[in-house]
Image: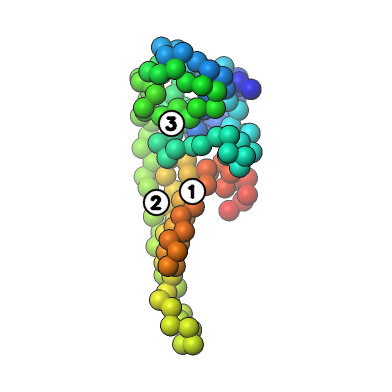
């Protein structure tokens, strides 16, 4: 379902995803974009993949598509031109190291890295399994993390 100008303004920092198929050369306007409120369900069901370099709604408005895009296509620098670079978000990085080691379990302390960048909360847990999680900030805010 496409969005209105008001919704686009309210979700300017959310990922930009097409709501329908649009031909190369289309100038992106709010009516071309999917409502970000339904992204968590679409991602969970596998219908939507949000690459790390997905542009935000605020960046993509007024840009031109360089490729024909199907419905639910994340808009990236690869399929659009003339988008605004926007204010580069300073990547915040926090390093947390557990200092307690249980003597009966000689496992090295786990390290956890949390960063916020490009509209995503990224969590890396390096405990022998190298677990990486990327959560769109809109979802993280809804989960009250």
Displayed quadrant of residue 101: bottom left
Q: Which residue is mark 3?
A: 55
Q: Which of pointers 2 and 3 indicates the residue nearer the eye?
A: 3
> Which residue sits at x=52%, y=47%?
135
> Which residue sits at x=51%, y=37%?
49
Q: CA distance from mark 1 to mark 3?
A: 16 Å
Q: Which residue is mark 1?
A: 134
Label 3: how many Cα within 10 Å (few below 14, some 14–19, many 20+):
many
Displayed quadrant of residue 2: top right
Q: Nearer the viewer, residue 81 or 86?
A: 81
Q: Which mark is residue 4?
A: none
Taking 108 as reference, is 145 above or below it?
A: above
Residue 70 in sight here: yes
Q: CA distance from mark 2 to mark 1?
A: 15 Å
> Which of disc 3 and disc 1 is earlier in sequence?
3
Using residue 68 as the reference point, say whether residue 38 is left or right of it: right
Residue 33 in sight here: no
Q: Which residue is mark 2?
A: 92
Taking 98 as reference, is 3 above or below it?
A: above
> Which residue sits at x=45%, y=27%?
75
Q: CA distance from mark 2 to mark 3?
A: 19 Å
Badges 1 and 3: C-beta atoms under 8 Å apart?
no
**Quarter of the image where the N terminus is located:** top right
Badge 2 marks a residue whose secondary structure is: strand
Q: Position of residue 109 (x, y in %)?
A: 42, 74
Q: Position of residue 143 (x, y in %)?
A: 63, 49
Label 1: how many Cα within 10 Å (few below 14, some 14–19, many 20+):
some
Badge 1 marks a residue whose secondary structure is: strand
Task: Give the farthest residue toward the bottom.
Answer: 104
Label 2: how many Cα within 10 Å (few below 14, some 14–19, many 20+):
few
Badges 2 and 3: C-beta atoms under 8 Å apart?
no
């Amino acid at each position: 379902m496409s969005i209105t100008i008001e919704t686009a303004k309210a979700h300017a920092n959310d990922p930009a995803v097409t709501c329908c198929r649009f031909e190369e050369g289309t100038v992106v306007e709010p009516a071309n974009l999917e409502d970000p409120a339904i992204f968590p369900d679409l991602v969970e069901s596998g219908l939507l993949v949000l690459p790390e370099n997905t542009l935000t709604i605020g960046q993509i408005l007024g840009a031109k598509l360089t490729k024909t895009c199907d419905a639910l296509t994340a808009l990236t620098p690869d399929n659009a031109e003339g988008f605004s670079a926007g204010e580069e978000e300073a990547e915040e990085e926090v390093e947390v190291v557990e200092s307690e080691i249980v003597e009966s379990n000689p496992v090295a302390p786990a390290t956890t890295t949390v960063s916020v960048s490009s509209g995503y909360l990224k969590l890396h847990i390096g405990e022998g399994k190298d677990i990486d999680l990327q959560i769109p900030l809109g979802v993280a805010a809804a989960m009250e993390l």
